[in-house]
Amino acid sequence: MSTAAVQSHAAIDLRALPTAERPERERHLRALPAIAPRRAPRLVHGIVGLVGLAGIIVAQLGLSVVISEGAYRLSALQGESTSLARTEQTLAEEIAVLSSPQHVAVAADELGMLAGQPSQFLTLGGAVTAGGPDALHMQVPAVDQFGMHVPNALLAEAPQAAATVQQVQAAAVRPHPGMLLPAGVSAAAAPAAAEAADQPAPGTLLPTTAGE
Amino acid sequence: MRAIEAEVPLAVKRNRSRNRVRTMLVAVLTFALLATFVVRLADIQLVRAEALNAEADGRRGVSQTIFGTRGPIVDAAGTVLAESVDRWDLTISPQYTRDLVPEVDGVDEAVTGGEALERIAAITGDDPLDLQAMILAELERDPESDYLLLASGLTATQYEAVRDLGLPYVYLRLNPQRVYPAGSVGGNLVGFMGQSEPLAGIERSEDACLDAQDGDRTFDRGADGTPIPGSMVTRPAVDGGTVQLTIDADVQYQAQQLTAQYTSQLRARSGTTIIMRTDGSIVAVAESAAVDPNDPTASDQRDRGSRAFTAAYEPGSIFKTFSFAAMVDLGLVEPTDELSVPWTYTEPGVRVRDAQSHEVKQWTAAGILVNSSNSGMVRLAEDMDRADYFDYLDRFGFGEQSAVGFAGEQAVPLRDPASLDPQTRLNVLFGQGIAATPIQLASAYQAMANGGEHLPARLIASCTAADGTVTTPETGEGERVVSASTARQTLEVLERVVTDYGYETFPIEGYRIAAKTGTAQMAYEDGSGYDPSRMMISVAGVFPVDDPQFVVLTLFDSPQTIRTSGGAIPAFHDMVNLLIRQYDIPPSTTPASDVPLEWTAGEQP
């Protein structure tokens, strides 16, 4: 005890020596500054943090809702566009049938129209040139008892025209091989007096005055 | 140390054990959470893997085909002759065809299977019992069948009506179809489609231009079928291109009408008319009977093609134009050369006769051609080397396919002139022993109309791809066959056929028309001789002679009422009339040709 106490005492004593007696040494040790007492975090920060987080989440939700809504709207509009395109195509098909030459010919026949006359040519002297086309078959109706010479299966979709074709065919007797034609009718030239009510014999050439 | 130890307060000891407890608690909780995850993972990946995979398969990316539209075929003015339209197939799932109950199937009112079929039948125009029978038959064949085609070719209105029925076991599939708005106008040229590919005509030969390429669209689908945004990948379809033909649909319609009328009037087997411009472009090719591509099965098998391109035959007298032109061009013959022509020509091993017997006639070379004298032609050609003659025929375009390259077109090769037997050596001068298709004949007359220069026949003007690029077919260069003066002289001789043949219906007042008639015998298929019951009457012509614009060729196979070529003359007359009216061709201002046909002994040659 004595030696240790003396030593410790000596150590203590050493430490207790006044500063001036120790050899000059820089002090490496400094006392820590006094710590400010820790305060609890302010409520504001927490609220701001939470609100910001909530805001971000809400914004993201909102955006995806809007995008999804947009997708549904887009889908609806595309559906509408497709259905309008279908309507357009249906109408275009109807127009194609109505403007087909067969329908035009049948409709013109019903209205009693005649085929157009050829142009007349004048010489510089003012005289009308002699001659010109004098078609043997210029005024032939599009539909006769044989049906249409240049048929169109699509005409069945234009009911009025189809009905006309069937009417004309039903009205005449279909010629069959071996059927006796009325006497006096030749295949070369038909009599000029062909009334509208008379059906010309099958195969006769209609004169140019027919139908006028 | 003990002193330090003695200083640890009791509170710290309690803290430490509390810490340990907390740590243990957290560790336990963490491990529990981990274990839950592991169990769930095992459950998904191992236990329920198959079921989940199956469910996911249905909800993965959906792929839809975007159909490209097959390109249209239009005429020179833009009139549509063929186009593609949307049609739908009605397919049904037989195993799921059931009565619909409002609660289970989400429909507003109950719909029994029978009612549903009745509604469908009312829209498609079928018999509901037929539909039911089809479904039952399919179920008998395969009780788990999921696909049956009930009806096809539904239009857009029908499609929307079926879709509005809201039947979950019905599926409508888009299946575009080809439609031909003009019907049988140009039907033999345009051709028609089979189930999925073209079978004839321009549809077939120009398929490379017309065909469309399908695209597709893949996307992920939401639970109610709406595509999820951002997931769509589209590969666009490429539409087919437009094929523009040189024909004029108006003239084609009227020419077809005339051909059909005359064919039925003459009681002929068939009729063909070709109208061509002098630059080789085809205005119309009319066939009777024509095929309506909307309904090809309504026509006879033989009528579904185009005889103008495929039916080769021995042309007969209309071929004399070319032998005459060859002789004039070679300088062997002048149209005013004078001959005495008996009606037969007989040498050892050969015999040639005119169509009608006559006394010895004093005909000029022009007269021989106009009167269509076979023995006269033989006499004129005594000095002509057949090799030279066949060289001319080759340049006229005989012996090879026309430049059109129509589907099924025949190329009838010329025989070797050195290998001909003596009779055939003479027969080829007046169109026997040699075969040609009508298009070759028309194209050769085009050379005569074009001042002796043969241009390739053209049917297709251009192909316009969907992106706008225009390609014109390569047809090669023209070729000079005879000199311009030879062509002019020949046409002037042929003009006398029209004015002097003796048929009232041949000439048209005010217009100079050159034409040649022909009655051709048709050989048996096996080549054992000529069929006495068949003949081909034909008229080929060029007009106006002073400024040729059109070539018209009209033929009728085996007419019953008038069996000479005079039967085709009214048809030719009407075709020329049609062209004059359509194109406002003014009358000729130059006087008609006055090439002498006969001579009398004592006159100055």
Image: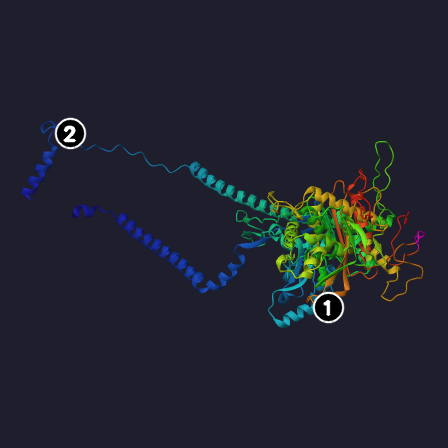
Q: Residue at x 11, y 27 (%)?
A: A20
Tell me: residue B401, above or below residue B133.
above
Question: Height in image: B63 above or below B77?
Answer: below
> How packed is label 2: few (under 14 Cα within 10 Å), some, or many (20 or more)?
few
Q: In the picture provided, is B54 more to the left or to the right than B26?
A: right
Q: Which residue lies furthest to the left in this view?
A: A3
Question: Mark 2 or mark 1: which is in front?
Answer: 1
Q: Mark 2 lies on which chain?
A: A
**Residue drawn at 62 percent across, 67 percent down:** B95
Q: Position of residue B258 (x, y in %)?
A: 80, 52
Q: Please determine whether, in this image, residue B299 is positioned above or below residue B181.
A: below
**Residue B225: quadrant of the picture:** bottom right
Camera-nearest residue between A23 and A126: A126
The residue labelled by disc 2 is: A26
Of residue B566 and residue B122, the one placed in the foreground of this image is: B566
Tell me the residue that label 1 is attached to: B129
Question: Picture coordinates of residue B101 (x, y %)?
Answer: 66, 63
Q: What stretch is highlighted in magenta?
A: A191-197
Which residue occupies the foreground of this view, B211 or B31? B211
Q: Report whether residue A170 is seen.
A: yes
Report whether A163 appears left or right of A59.
right
What's the amino acid at mark 1? Leu
Asked if badges 2 and 1 are on one and the same chain, I answer: no
Quarter of the image for residue A26 reads top left
Parent chain of label 1: B
Residue located 90% across and 65% down the image: A180
Instruction: Specify the label residue B468 is tagged with.
Output: none
Q: Residue flagged by tag 2: what amino acid is it?
A: Glu
Residue A196 within the magenta-colored segment of the rendering: yes
> How dense is the environment of label 1, judged by Cα within 10 Å: few (below 14), some, or many (20 and up)?
few
Prevailing SS of the magenta stretch: loop
